[in-house]
Image: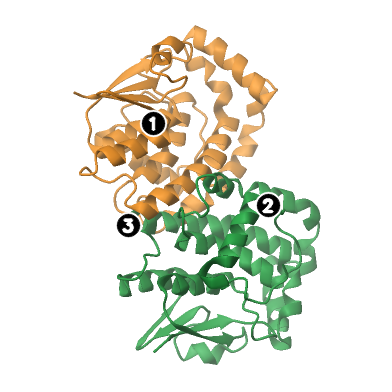
Chain colours: A green, B orange
Amino acid sequence: MPITLYDLAGADPARRFSPYCWRARLALAQKGLDVETIPWRFTERSAIGVLGSEKVPVIVDGDHVQNESWQIAEYLEATYPDRPSLFGGAGGHALARFLTGWADAVVLAGIAGLIVSDIPAILAPDDAAYFVESREKRYRKTLAEVTAGRETRVTAFREALLPLRLALRQGPFLHGEAPGYGDAIVFGGFQWARCCSPFPILEASDPVHAWRERMLDAYDGLGRSAPGFA
Amino acid sequence: MPITLYDLAGADPARRFSPYCWRARLALAQKGLDVETIPWRFTERSAIGVLGSEKVPVIVDGDHVQNESWQIAEYLEATYPDRPSLFGGAGGHALARFLTGWADAVVLAGIAGLIVSDIPAILAPDDAAYFVESREKRYRKTLAEVTAGRETRVTAFREALLPLRLALRQGPFLHGEAPGYGDAIVFGGFQWARCCSPFPILEASDPVHAWRERMLDAYDGLGRSAPGFA
């Protein structure tokens, strides 16, 4: 029986854009596990509320319900030890936690400041209203104000990716010759940007761009098959 | 026969202050290997030139000479597989590379901008002259100009440590319950600051400060036993 993944979707149910759901989706792909995804929208609280969660990703694996992308990765690693390892051992597990902190604080927060005003346009109407209200409350400004000046500010974002660029000097993926969960952690953010916004967050000459392309092609082109902008 | 480590020293030969040498020193400690350190100064080129290196750290292990802190860690991990693992497996090895990029780009570069003008005072006279000239050439400004405004700028440096703070929510060390080479990579920078400058780069209430204290105490207080400011 395939694992069920509740996966954040736009107005187009095929547009799956959550960076955290992408982390889970890639973890499942890396483990080679069958998955059935269910498109979920911000305003469909009851669909996952019965599972005890307020947010996606949520997976249902037989009798087990697991939410939160990091805990989903840990669950899959513990439950399917004979399949390819997500973390590559105890050290990888520990340092992937640091990488999650970096990706959340630098990559996701940085991308949000560049694209968040483009997101309502890809959402279903009820979700768009919820999204604008909740995010403008969080930012204490309009979404247009959040992304104002992005053509200039994108330079600082790109500079902040230097650690990624330095690591990618050593091999095609953060995990070396093949992608691991560390790659999924960071790629989730770039896939989010690609699915939500036409704004070019990376220059084509950037080694991070080349890595993003490799990640789009990984797992039989799973990332590239998703509706997106570029 | 103990491993020999050529270790950057100040005017006081006991003051060992290189962040890269500290990475190597902690890697040796983590492996539980006997080490004999030789104080080395910037202007003593010939002492390590005969070993084929222009910079420290350099280790000599029997017939094998190895320089560059990352490669020293890889050498020790490969040569002493039965001793405690530095990386904790293939995933830890790969992600420690990313962590090195982050530590170099954010921690070391950030600390340099806060303390570099304090370094000449701890150096032997010839080294101080060399250091000032070479660093002012690199920065294209005086060292006093580099650290100007540090009382204000330190706030941005502390904010950039957020990924470290997020990771340390999960356990006392980046590697979990005990420190690993990932901890050494980052700690090297903080130990450099402590050995060179009285400037307070961390607030005492910061979880990063508490982690630094734990790292100073690790390996029988190896870090704390080094002459430093705080």
Q: Mark 2 Cα within 10 Å, few/some/many (few <14, many 20+)?
A: many
The structure residue drawn at horizontal position 22% and vertical position 28%, both measured from the top left corner, is B34
- Amino acid type indicated by mark 1: Trp
Residue pointed to by mark 1: B22
Q: Residue at x 55, y 81 (%)?
A: A7
Residue of label 3: A90
Figure quadrant of the C terminus of chain B: top left
Residue B29 screen position, x and y as percent: 27, 35
| Residue A11 seen anywhere in this rendered image of the structure | yes
Mark nearer the viewer, 1 or 3? 3
Residue at 44 percent of width and 69 percent of height: A30
Mark 2 and mark 1, same subunit?
A: no
Disc 1 chain ID: B
Who's the residue at 42% across and 40% down the image? Answer: B185
Q: Position of residue B110 (x, y in %)?
A: 57, 37
User: Residue A212: horizontal and vertical position, in percent?
Assistant: 61, 60
Could you tell me how far apart the alpha carbons at marks 3 and 2 are, in whole angstroms? 31 Å
What chain letter is assigned to the residue under label 3?
A
In which quadrant of the rendered image does the N terminus of chain B lie?
top left
What chain is tagged by disc 2?
A: A
| Distance from the alpha carbon under mark 1 to that under mark 3 | 23 Å
Q: Is there any visible trace of residue A137 in the rendered image? A: no
Front in this rendered view, residue A117 or A62: A62
Tell me how far mark 2 sits from mark 1, CA to CA.
Answer: 31 Å
The three-letter amino acid code for the residue at tag 3 is: Ala
Q: Is residue B60 left or right of residue B108?
A: left
Q: Nearer the viewer, residue B230 or B42?
A: B42
- Disc 3 element: helix
Whether residue A211 sits left or right of residue B220 in the image: it is right
Of residue A156 and residue A188, the one placed in the foreground of this image is A188
Element assignment for label 2: helix
